[in-house]
Image (cartoon, rainbow, N blue to C red):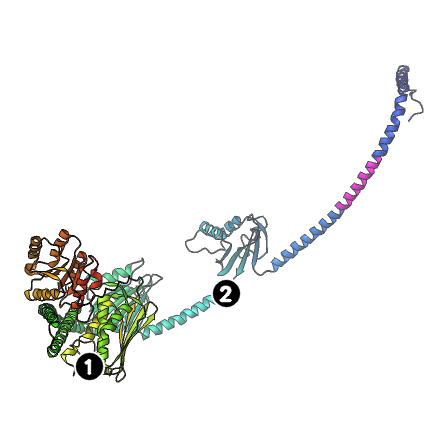
Amino acid sequence: MPDTLINPDDTIERQNEKLLKIAGALMGRVEQGSDVRGMAYAQFERAVMLEAEVGARTRELEHALNLLNKSNAQLAEANADAEAARANLATAIETVQEGFALFDANEVLVMCNSRFGQHMRDIHHLFKPGLAFHEYVELASQSPFLYLPEGTTPAQWAAMRMTRHKDDHVVFNARMAGSRWLQVSEHRTHDGGTVVLQTDVTDMMLLERQERERLLDDQARLIKATLEHLDQGVCIFDDEARLVGWNRRLSELLSIPTGRFRIGTPFFSIYRQMLRDNTFLDANRANTLVKWSEGKDARAPLSLEMAFGPNRILAVFAQQMPDGGFVISFTDVSAERAAARALSEVNETLERRVMDRTLELEDALAEAERANASKSRFVAAASHDLLQPLSAAKLYLASIDSDLHDPELRQRLGKTESALKSVESILGALLDISRLDSGSASVDLTGIALNRMLGQLRDEMAPQAAEKGLSLSISQKSAWVHSDATYLRRILQNLISNALRYTTHGEVRVDLQQLDDRLSVSISDTGPGIPIDHQDKVFDEFHRVNSDTGPADGLGLGLAIVDRACRLLKHPLRMISKTGQGTTFTIELPLATQFATERPERPNVAENTPLQRIVLLIENDDVMRNALTMTLEGWGADVLPCANGGDALKLLEEIDIAPDIVLADYQLNDGALGTDTIAILQQKFGDITCCVITANRIAPVPEECARLGAMLLYKPINLVKLRAFVEQAATPGSLQQSGDTVPENGTDAIPT
């Protein structure tokens, strides 16, 4: 700085101008001197604070610089490690024997080794980081070093390659120039990238091809040996219908010299030689085989036959192979066809004989059915005609029983009644077996209190057992079974009666045993037993083990009825018998799921108590009507006997009295029915106790009686049941047909 404020070199005017400015400035400074002194302390104080803040910021900056330097050092170290790792990775993948390439999730090449794509020398130098995957595929498809399958363009191959690339894992073989083979495999990485490996498998393919050729040679030799051992003639053609294989048997069957068969011979040439002296059995199919061989699409197997001479027939079978070729086999079936012709002739002869015999059997069967129907009608008619007078005879005998006091006459009367009971039992058995054989029997399956039925049978059979000195033990275990009451009673009655008849000492026992949902009923005796040679025949009609028994002991129909009734009801029946130890018959009955209500016991009325009832009797048979009238009047009843329904209606109108009981025969004269008259009387007199008596066992009778609420009694009439019916007639409507149709002794036949 110069020693003075005025430059001596300036002009006087310039110097004066500067002096004026200096003076002005000094004057102003003097005027503001007091304010400057006040602000000096404030500026000093601010300077101190700024110095402290600058120091703090300087220290923070120094700390940040230290951290930055440390981070830069770590980053430099990490970059060095990364470079080292990248170098190691590059070195590692370079040592891999396969071609290796890594594409990131954006389908961009990250790195690859020198072996990747080395077989495509024209584009190998283009495989560098940054190359897109689709560009890599496009380059590969255009390379002349890639051998494309026949008929495939580079664009098609690239499209197929990109389609395969969508899969997570891809493995395929690619043929390269110079007969080299690459196995290309792709695998997805966890971040969506792709690893591609290219492995040279040329040596493996060569070994595989050699092994395949060896196997094919072995297989060809095996096939050749197999063909030569076949009894069939076989020829094999390729997809151009050219001969590629055959066996010697073919020449023998077709009568064509072996030299005519050569590799590549067209099928049509062989076909012409084959037809030279031979013909197809079916002329319409003569050209079928040629047309079939010319087909290119899928062909169904073809089968036909050819005649080679008068005595030789070949079966021709053509089958397409997977490669489009086909195989034709020729089988000599001359013996089979000759046997078939002979068998056909035999069959025709047999058919004629069978037809003749069938006609004879049909005639015999028709005759047997007519005879059986005639037998059934005869038995039914004869039984009906016999039951009418038999029932009347029983009624007459019952009416004179109380008038006889001479012991000898009463003894004769008892024997007569016994003889009539035997006749009645035989007629009932004949009716039963006829009905079961004719198939007209019907069943009414209900819940049955078996202990009550067995109790009645015990009371009925006890006198017979006591007379022979036998012990009769019948279980009274409470049990309800599902069966037909009438048939079940007859089954049990016949088995117990049969056991008592043939047992001379010891006991007859009836036991019950529950088996799940079934009840086993066993009837055992200590009789002589049934010999083994008779055991298969005991259920036959009219077969009796003891031939010394008389007609009073039955006709041998009891077990036949039991067997047929058990089969009708589907109740299994078994028999165990040992000679000298006795016999046991066992029946299995289904248990009832719902129990019926027990009927109240009938009140006991003394037999000598007069039955003061008005009974309207409608019976067309004079003898039966007189016998019933005599019996009812003997019981104290007032009887109004009539021969038909018309007479009954007129009589009631004349005397103007409503009867207590109507007792009507079912079948009256001129086709009239007693049930029709009962229906008229019920309309006129309201609820009236009725009973239908009949010797007819046809099916509609029980249904009609049930509809009318009428009692049903079969002839010959059981006097105990008839009296019980008359006794209960005091309470109208107290009788129910369903319960009282069940027979209460062994003399009643089974109703249908």
- For residue 482, what is the image quadrant? bottom left
Which residues, given as a range, are shown in magenta? 51-67
Residue in view at x 93 percent, y 22 percent: 4
Where 4 sits versus 160, above or below?
above
Q: Position of residue 642 (x, y in %)?
A: 7, 60
Closer to viewer: mark 2 or mark 1: 1
User: How many numbered circles does the render carry?
Assistant: 2
Q: Position of residue 736 (x, y in %)?
A: 21, 60
The answer to whether residue 98 is magenta is no
Please give the residue where the numbered disc 1 appears in the rendered image: 545
- SS at circle 1: loop
Residue in view at x 32 percent, y 74 percent: 228
Q: Is residue 156 left or right of residue 236?
A: right
The mark found on residue 417 in the picture is none
- SS at circle 2: helix
Please give the residue where the numbered disc 2 appears in the rendered image: 204
Q: Position of residue 268 (x, y in %)?
A: 26, 63
User: Mark 2 and mark 1: span between their CA atoms?
Assistant: 93 Å
- The reply to whether residue 333 is in sight is no
Question: Is 87 in front, or is 194?
Answer: 194
Most extreme residue toward the bottom is: 580
Where 12 sits versus 648, above or below?
above
Q: Is residue 535 left or right of residue 716?
A: right
Q: The disc labelled 2 sits on which kind of residue?
A: Met
- Neighbor class of circle 1 (other Cα within 10 Å; few <14, some 14-19, many 20+) is some
Q: The disc labelled 1 sits on which kind of residue?
A: Val
For the stretch drawn in magenta, what is the main secondary structure? helix
Q: Position of residue 312 (x, y in %)?
A: 20, 72
Q: Is residue 25 left or right of residue 330?
A: right
- Neighbor class of circle 2 (other Cα within 10 Å; few <14, some 14-19, many 20+) is few
- Label located before the other in sequence (2 or 1): 2
The answer to whether residue 54 is magenta is yes
